[in-house]
Amino acid sequence: MNIKIFKNSDEASQAVFELYKNKKEEGATVFGLATGSTPEKLYQLMSDSDLDFSESTSINLDEYVGLGSEHPQSYAYFMNQHLFRHKPFKESHLPNGLAKDLDQETRRYDEVIANNPIDLQLLGLGSNGHIGFNEPGSSFDSQTQHVQLTESTISDNQRFFSSEEEVPKEAISMGIASILSAKEIVIMAFGLNKAKAVKEMIQGPMTEAIPASALQQHRKVHVFLDEKAASLLD
Ligand code: F6R
């Protein structure tokens, strides 16, 4: 893992933005994208830049079950607000949270990933070590899956909803094997509440109890941290 530590999240996001610029210049066309608060600054930098994604493809990690793209807390809505309405892609893929047959939807999404091998996958890190919505205990062999969110993720995500009852309890997520199939991976983590998960991801044993520790087996992972998230590293 290639680990970079910055004074704050703004400086880290600027560095990730530079990496995206370089990768695009080198010919990357398929970008795996994430939602959540961590990539917001990166998406703002992309939106304000002269980067052109009109010939690129995006594939998002996950979507809540039960929320359609018009719902303000859906990840489809988030992506439109933060990136796609400013920088349209040629094709943008997200799991369909309203799919009637969720198993069929996971298979459809695996085909999307198989047909569009991801050049650069962006990840945030859950405070419990999740990547995508692959919660602790997820198999490292998992493809796209229908998942139940853990109590810790539901409570972390409550800040985006008016009450905990409103937070969806299920999601469709790219699996850990799907994530590891990307040619290159960027994971960002900011703030003290990520420090323990960061340490376990990088310096702990590789274990399904910490989904992000699976990244230790990938050849090309860039980790971008602020000082707080890096504070427990040896
Ligand atoms: C989002 C996702 C999640 C988040 C993680 C961190 O698409 O897959 O794994 O990256 O929960 O969320 P934030 O950035 O809100 O701390």
Image (cartoon, rainbow, N blue to C red):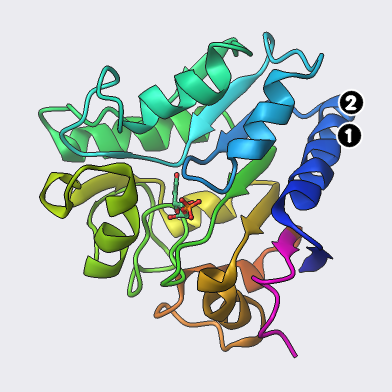
**Rendered position, 201 above or below 104:** below
Q: Secondary structure at mark 2?
A: helix
Predominant SS of the magenta segment: loop
Query: How busy is the neighbourhood of tag 1: few (under 14 within 10 Å), some, or many (20 plus)?
Result: few
Q: Position of residue 212 (x, y in %)?
A: 53, 68
Residue 67 visible in the picture: yes
Query: How busy is the neighbourhood of tag 2: few (under 14 within 10 Å), some, or many (20 plus)?
Result: few
**Rendered position, 73 above or below 225:** above
Which residue was labeled with disc 1? 22
Residue 156 in which image quadrant: bottom left
Q: How many marks?
A: 2
Q: Say which residue appears at 61% left-offset and 45% top-offset.
A: 122
Ligand 1 within 8 Å of the CB at mark 2? no
> Relative to 194, is 120 on the left or the right?
right
Residue 213 visible in the picture: no
Cβ–Cβ below 8 Å for labels 1 and 2?
yes
Q: Say which residue appears at 51% left-offset and 31% top-offset.
A: 59
